[in-house]
Amino acid sequence: MKYMLIMQMNPVVWDALPQERREEVMSAHEGFIKLIQDSGEMVGSNALGAPADSVTVRGREGGPAVTDGPYAEAKEYMGGYYLVECASKERAVELASLIPDTGVDGMAVEVRPVIFSTGSAV
C-alpha cells in the first residue's frame, strides 16, 4: 500500500530554530532518503514552495475562482512529502517517525493512505 508522509511546516517554529539546527534537520533528510531507497519503499518525494507563492482554485457557482495562497488563516502548511510503498500502516508510521522534522517540537508529519494513483487503483 502507498502512503503519503506529509511534512507539516510551521514557519514560526522553523524560524525560531538556530541556523545550525535547521541545517542539521535538512541534511538529516539525506539519511532518511537513503534508508527508504535502500529498503525499496521510496516512490518519490518533493519539497514545496511557501504558501505565499501559491494560489488556490476553488469551485464557485458560475465557474472557478482563484485566490492567493492555500488558506489565509493557516499556521501550518504542507512543506513537502515522501510517497512510500510499504507493507502496513504501522510501517508507514514507523517511517514517518524517522523523518527529521519529527525531532522538532511543533513540527509534524501526517501519514495518509493513497487510495488512487494515476492510471491504476492502489
Image (cartoon, rainbow, N blue to C red):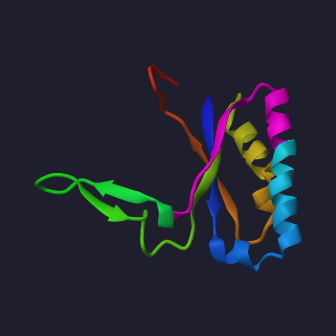
Residue bounds of the magenta highlight = 32-51
Quadrant showing the N terminus: top right
16 sits to left or right of 8: right
Task: Find residue 29 and report its horizontal and vertical position in percent.
Answer: 81, 49
Task: Find residue 100 and report its horizontal and vertical position in percent.
Answer: 81, 55
Q: Compare residues 17 and 116 and report the one nearer the observer.
A: 17
Q: Compare residues 35 and 19 and report the one nearer the observer.
A: 19
Task: Find residue 57 and report its horizontal and vertical position in percent.
Answer: 31, 54
Above or below — where is 86 with respect to 120? Answer: below
Res 35 quadrant in image: top right
10 sits to left or right of 51: right
Q: Compare residues 66 and 112 and report the one nearer the observer.
A: 66
Task: Find residue 87 and report its horizontal and vertical position in percent.
Answer: 71, 28
Which residue is rendered at x = 64% and y = 72% of the image?
Answer: 11
Residue 83 visible in the snapshot: no
Res 54 quadrant in image: bottom left
Q: Compare residues 60 and 98 and report the one nearer the observer.
A: 60
Instruction: Tell me if residue 116 is in the magenta stretch.
Output: no
Which residue is rendered at x = 43% and y = 62% of the image?
Answer: 70
Residue 48 visible in the snapshot: yes
Instruction: Tell me if residue 45 is in the magenta stretch.
Output: yes
57 sits to left or right of 79: left
98 sits to left or right of 88: right
